[in-house]
Image (tube, rainbow, N blue to C red):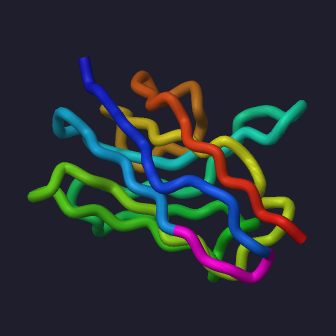
Amino acid sequence: QVQLVESGGGLVQAGGSLTLSCAFSERTNTMAWFRQAPGKDREFVASISWYGDTRNYADSVKGRFIISRDNAKSSVYLQMSSLKAEDTAVYYCAASGAVAVTTKERYAYWGQGTQVTVSS
């Protein structure tokens, strides 16, 4: 059972930056960040392969967010910049045994989520 623990959420002003961290307990092929705003479905944000050579981003965050990982520290990160009010959501870290997947149904393991609130 893969365990995931997110941290780093908080309140930030529009245009600001924030970095989320996710600590994982075991190796998996792909790790990702998803987010869920109130009343909306959980949506894909970004994913990264074990070696970091394959990364995918949602169109809404391309050029603003960067996903990275440090396997020696068993951690995955999401650097968020130029934040907008519409980025406000609970952000979830997820892990999958599949490769380069972007749909939530392909992720078996989830963290508890961390709240990101962007004030305009």
Residue visible at 80% across and 41% down?
37
22 is higher (above) or lower (below) than 53: above
Which quadrant: the C terminus? bottom right
Which quadrant: the N terminus? top left
The region drawn magenta spans 14-18
Q: Position of residue 102 (x, y in %)?
A: 56, 45
Q: Position of residue 6 (x, y in %)?
A: 42, 43
**The furthest residue to the top:** 1
Residue visible at 65% across and 74% down?
62
| Quadrant in the rendering for residue 39 | top right
Lateral position of residue 102 relative to residue 11, left or right: left
Q: Position of residue 55 (x, y in %)?
A: 43, 64
Lateral position of residue 113 relative to residue 84, left or right: left
Q: Position of residue 63 (x, y in %)?
A: 63, 82
117 is higher (above) or lower (below) than 108: below
Residue visible at 71% across and 35% down?
42
| Quadrant in the rendering for residue 73 | bottom left
| Quadrant in the rendering for residue 92 | top right
**The furthest residue to the left:** 72
Lateral position of residue 7 relative to residue 113, left or right: left
Tally of numbered tags: 0
Q: Is residue 24 magenta?
A: no
Our reading of the magenta stretch's main secondary structure is: loop
Question: Foreground: 115 or 72?
Answer: 115
Question: Foreground: 66 or 57?
Answer: 66
Lateral position of residue 106 relative to residue 49, left or right: right
63 is higher (above) or lower (below) than 120: below
